[in-house]
Image (cartoon, helix red, strand yellow):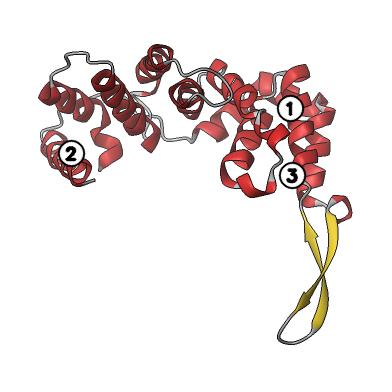
């Protein structure tokens, strides 16, 4: 933990120096990945005809589609009606959306539901995480490189394959190095840690220099 804090401190410090010197002239993408991918004409066309995506959004937002339960407050002894999202149904619809329409927005939303609501998702639907991650990866999303790489790095519903995970992260580095977000920094950290895990000889200072060279606009 202390090493990581020191590592980040050095990065911020070097980033400030390089920024002051205007060392990095690369163009930076200011629009978020989600907004960009959703604005693509091809994705807009998918969203218009994807019936499964539309149904999933209704299950997320329409109370009539939610699970209705009664809960009693033990202190006040009052019973109230509570509406809960049927995450299993939503994930089933997002999975169908991805399989039939290759919808990247369904993949993003489905992946994040599993990631952020693990206790509300059944074991069966948790397996969908690899389907969502692969679709995000194929669309060249930085979050997709992280998600798909993690599948093989951690062995999520598949065998651990560190070399394949590293290859995914390295391809993400090439795509994401000009994006102004936290994802590139995490991809770089993943590459460094996996190279170290595989025993690859990669100069630490060279890594820091490369990292700051391409990531200073995000850091500042």
In percent of width and height, residue 44 lies at 70, 26
In percent of width and height, residue 144 lies at 51, 25
Whether residue 113 sits left or right of residue 62 in the image: it is left
Which badge, 2 or 1, is on the more N-terminal residue?
A: 2
Whether residue 118 sits left or right of residue 23 in the image: it is right
| Residue sitting nearer the eye, 205 or 198 | 198
In percent of width and height, residue 8 lies at 21, 41
Q: For residue 167, what is the image quadrant?
A: top left
Residue at image position (11%, 25%) is 205
Question: In the rendered image, which quarter contains the N terminus?
Answer: top left
In percent of width and height, residue 135 lies at 61, 20
Q: How many marks?
A: 3
Q: Is mark 2 on a helix, strand or loop?
A: helix
Residue lying farthest to the front in this orientation: 159
| Residue sitting nearer the eye, 141 or 118 | 118
Q: Distance between the residues labelled 2 and 3?
A: 39 Å
Residue at image position (26%, 40%) is 219
Which badge, 2 or 3, is on the more N-terminal residue?
A: 2
Q: For residue 158, what is the image quadrant?
A: top right
Residue highlighted by disc 2: 7
Mark drawn on residue 87 = 3
Residue highlighted by disc 1: 95
| Residue sitting nearer the eye, 44 or 63 | 63
């Amino acid at each position: 933990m202390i090493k990581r804090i020191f590592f980040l401190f050095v990065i911020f410090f070097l980033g400030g120096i390089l920024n002051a010197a205007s060392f990095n002239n690369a163009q930076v993408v200011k629009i978020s990945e989600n907004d960009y991918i959703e604005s693509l004409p091809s994705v807009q066309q998918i969203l218009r005809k994807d019936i499964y995506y539309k149904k999933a959004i209704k299950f997320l937002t329409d109370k009539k589609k939610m699970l209705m339960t009664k809960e009693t407050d033990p202190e006040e002894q009052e019973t109230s009606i509570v509406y809960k999202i049927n995450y299993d149904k939503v994930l089933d619809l997002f999975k169908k959306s991805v399989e039939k329409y290759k919808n990247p927005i369904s993949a993003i939303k489905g992946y994040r539901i599993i990631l952020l609501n693990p206790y509300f998702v059944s074991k069966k639907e948790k397996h969908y995480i690899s389907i969502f991650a692969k679709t995000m990866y194929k669309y060249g999303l930085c979050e997709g490189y992280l998600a798909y790489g993690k599948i093989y790095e951690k062995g999520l519903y598949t065998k651990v394959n560190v070399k394949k995970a590293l290859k995914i992260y390295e391809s993400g580095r090439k795509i994401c190095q000009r994006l102004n977000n936290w994802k590139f920094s995490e991809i770089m950290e993943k590459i460094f840690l996996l190279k170290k895990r595989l025993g690859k000889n990669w100069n630490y200072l060279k890594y820091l220099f490369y990292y700051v060279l391409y990531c200073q606009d995000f850091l500042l």
